[in-house]
Amino acid sequence: MDGDPQALVQRPGRPTRARCATWINILEADPELGQGLSARAFGAACERSQVRLVRLTSGAVAGWPLRGEPEPGFHAFVVLRGLVTRRVAMRELHAAELFGPGDLLRPWALRDEGVLQQRARWRVHGPTDLAVLDQAFQRRVASWPEIGSALRDRETARTHSLVTRLLIAQAPRITDRVRLLLWHLAGRWGYVRRDGVVVPLRLSKTLVAELVCTTRESASRALTALALAGVVECTDTGFLLHRTPSTDAETACGPGEKQPVALSA
């Protein structure tokens, strides 16, 4: 991988620091990658599944590991902890992409598109750990193709997630978009608690707006309307969802919006 992993990545504002912290066992850190293996095969694969761990601090990223070309045969990074966003701009238009625990990162494959004059920026939100799946790792686990299959399944799941985001962005009401987005994120990273479903992602209103293709002001009004309706609660660690999409649509209306037909996700 190009660049010095110990160096401070320079960028105006708050830069992020990337460093190779240690070696970890990827199957122990992310056992779902070995879910297709028998217990005996899983144990054997674990003995060959040591990978480097890269730790990132909060801030914008201009260099390694999310910029630059990889070494030949490099597969991907796996997000083990934290949140990374890729913000794309085209003239006055903006959109964002989320990468959280379990997601694969192949940043060199996401180049700026010159024809449409797109610009992309990476940002790390809070302490983030990336597992390095390099060529050496692929050679070590080649005897267990189930691991490679699990990685390809995640790439496919990410494509499905992006299609879901496109569907959500077509909802005419911004409150519906925000509500369905939060439930979509809950399906990926949330967990159930006695008082609701927790989405442990601290998303700014600007980021929520870019995820549902609207303005920050509209996203802010939608979150306020959902909170007043008892549908969504903003917490210090993210969001707490109190109702399922099929039951909350009739109660959450933004200012001046008509009562919608109930939607189901």
Image (tube, grey):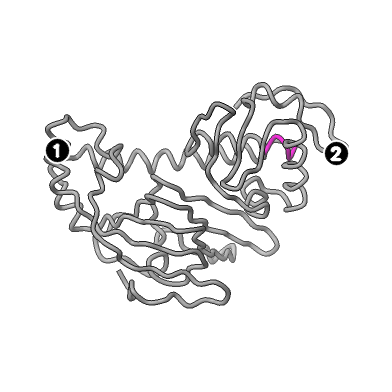
Residue type at numbered disc 1: Gly
> Is the residue 250 above or below the residue 190 in the image?
above
Q: Position of residue 216 (x, y in %)?
A: 73, 53
Q: Which residues are magenta?
A: 172-177
Picture residue at 21% right of the left edge, 58% below the top: 135
| Residue 206 place in picture, x, y as percent | 67, 55
Q: Quick check: can you spot residue 241?
A: yes
Q: Tell me how far mark 2 sits from mark 1, CA to CA.
A: 57 Å
Q: What number is the disc on residue 204? A: none
Identify the main secondary structure in magenta. helix
Q: Is residue 173 magenta?
A: yes
Judged from the image, the secondary structure of the residue bearing numbered disc 1 is helix
Against 181, residue 21 (above or below) is below
- Dividing the picture into quarters, in which one does residue 172 lie? top right
Q: Give the residue number, with chain letter if any, for mark 1.
A: 43
Image quarter hosting the C terminus:
top right
Residue 257 placed where, x, y %?
Answer: 84, 34
Q: Earlier in the sequence, mark 2 or mark 1?
A: 1
Q: Which amino acid is tagged 2?
A: Pro
Quadrant of the drawing holding the N terminus: bottom left
73 is within the stretch colored magenta: no
Residue visible at 13% across and 46% down? 47
Task: Name the one closer to the observer, 58 or 108.
Answer: 58
Q: Which residue of the protein is positioned furthest toward the right in this rendering?
A: 256
Query: Dot 1: few (<14), some (14–19), or many (≥20) neighbours within 10 Å?
Result: some
Q: Which residue is mark 2?
A: 255
Q: Is residue 167 visible?
A: no
Front residue (pair 78, 157): 78
